[in-house]
Amino acid sequence: MSSKVVLITGASSGIGKSIASYLSLKGFKVYGTSRNPKNLENFSFELIALDVLDISSIQNAIDLIVEKEGRLDVLVNNAGMGITGPIEDTPTEEMRNVFNTNFFGAIDVMKSVLPQMRKQNSGLIINVTSIAGYMGLPFRGVYSASKGALEIITEATSMEVKSFGINVVNVAPGDFATNIASGRYHTPVFENSAYKKKYKENLELMDSHVDSGLDPIVMAKSVFKIINTKNPKLHYKVGDFMQKFSIVLKRILPDRVYEKLLMNHYKL
């Protein structure tokens, strides 16, 4: 069989670009996406236009790939955005924007590739979520919620499409050294906010975690391994030991004990 055809959303930078570059190097036919690919240069893979908030844009990109390649084997649903802020201070409209991208946008891309994968009686969908999606993190609650919601949708979709020869999995990364911090929506540190001091301290802590995060190539290698696994697991976690272990602790510790550990970590 010829090399697999892979669609990767949000591939203009960070984790998406790393995955796309690595898979291209390994011989896959990779189509990365960006909202404005004409403004970008020097990519080792083909970059096409796709906006996860625009259904016609999603369908046009998939039609283009299928017309050129005759198939679509793998979707890496990676496009997303970050958000920080106390729940009380964060504009609800900004929360909706994040869910529209991280949750509904990812669902719309899945819905758009499934007819072609059903036709082929084969396919793999990899939803990129986050270790943060396994727990409610202070000042990142909306981001955690959007990624946690996508985890649950992944589980449901996996069961619904299994009989069509399609696998749906999720990969939850921890902190990686990318430009995600610069692309987040940051709720301003309001002068009159009850959360001013703690939120400001935690913004600095979050940025330091990203700056000292793992190399995105680790995610790329993990995705490559999943694609080459005959019967992939439903959930994968990719991060340092303590980030992955935090999920285990949440499962085994009493709720308030785990909450206290998080509060101590975030100095609350």
Image (cartoon, rainbow, N blue to C red):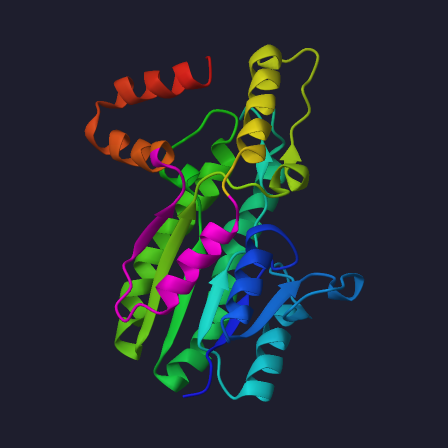
Q: Position of residue 90 (x, y in %)?
A: 60, 29
The residue depicted at 54 percent of the width and 69 percent of the height is: 25
Residue 136, image quadrant? top left
Q: Position of residue 147 (x, y in %)?
A: 45, 45
Residue farthest right in this picture: 39
- Which one is nearer the viewer's eye here, 188 or 201? 201
The residue depicted at 66 percent of the width and 58 percent of the height is: 12
Magenta stretch holds residue 211: no
Magenta stretch holds residue 219: yes
The residue depicted at 51 percent of the width and 53 percent of the height is: 217
The residue depicted at 49 percent of the width and 41 percent of the height is: 214
Check the picture and name the quadrant holding the N terminus: bottom left
Q: Position of residue 218 (x, y in %)?
A: 46, 51
Residue 255, image quadrant? top left
- Which one is nearer the viewer's eye here, 4 or 163? 4
Residue farthest front in this picture: 25
- Which one is nearer the viewer's eye here, 194 or 125? 125
Residue 86 vertical position relative to residue 229 in the rendered view, above or below:
above
> Would you say 166 lies left or right of 147 here?
left
> Would you say 71 lies left or right of 182 here?
left
Part of the protein shown in magenta = 215-241
